[in-house]
């Protein structure tokens, strides 16, 4: 069975077809975060992606958006969260 990966964010960001890490884009929702600025977080949990989309809206404005993505060079961080070097956007998920 193939896993579906999601990334929640705001439509205030211009993203072409690839999600890049905060150190490449300058967009970091958690200003206190001192590490993991060189990775992208994705999840296999659609509810979690939606939650993070709304958190991004609270920080940066705009509207929540969730992308279905294909993570590149990824590893599991916890039960439903993964870390990757970048993620290719496959589709936009209706929320």
Image (cartoon, rainbow, N blue to C red):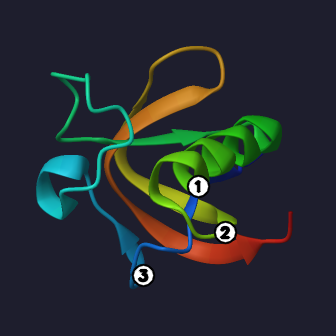
- Residue 20 occupies which quadrant of the picture? bottom left
Is label 3 in a helix, a strand or a loop? loop
Q: CA distance from mark 2 to mark 1?
A: 6 Å
Q: In the rendered structure, find residue 63 and report the number of the disc placed on it.
A: 2
The picture places residue 57, in percent across and down from the top left corner, at: 59, 55
Q: How far apart are the two marked residues, 2 and 3, measured between alpha carbons?
A: 18 Å
Task: Tell me if 45 is positioned left or right of 27 in this view.
Answer: right
Q: Which residue is more in the foreground, 42 or 75?
A: 42
Residue 91 lies left or right of residue 39; in this view the side is right
Q: Mark 1 touching mark 3, by CB under 8 A?
A: no
Above or below residue 65? Residue 55 is above
Q: Position of residue 68 (x, y in %)?
A: 65, 63
Residue 26 in the image: x percent, y percent?
18, 57
Dot 1: what SS? helix
Q: Image point 56% across, 64% down: which residue? A: 10
Q: Is 77 left or right of 86, judged from the image as shown?
A: right
Locate the C terminus by quadrant. bottom right
Whichever of callouts 2 and 1 sits on the residue coming sooner in the sequence is: 1
Q: Are marks 2 and 1 in contact (CB under 8 Å)?
A: yes
Cα–Cα span, label 1 and label 3: 20 Å
Q: Earlier in the sequence, mark 1 or mark 3?
A: 3
To which residue does mark 3 refer? 17
Q: Is residue 8 placed above or below 66 in the rendered structure?
A: above
Which residue carries the number 1 mark?
Answer: 57
Tag count in the figure? 3
User: Which circle, 2 or 3, is nearer the viewer?
Assistant: 2
């Amino acid at each position: 069975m193939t896993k579906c990966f999601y990334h929640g964010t705001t439509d205030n960001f211009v993203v072409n077809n690839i999600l890049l890490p905060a150190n490449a884009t300058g967009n970091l929702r958690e200003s206190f975060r001192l590490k993991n600025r060189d990775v992208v977080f994705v999840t296999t949990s659609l509810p979690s992606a939606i939650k993070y989309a709304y958190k991004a809206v609270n920080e940066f404005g705009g509207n929540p958006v969730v992308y279905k993505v294909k993570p590149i060079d990824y590893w599991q961080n916890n039960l439903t969260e993964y870390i990757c070097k970048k993620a290719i956007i496959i589709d936009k998920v209706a929320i």
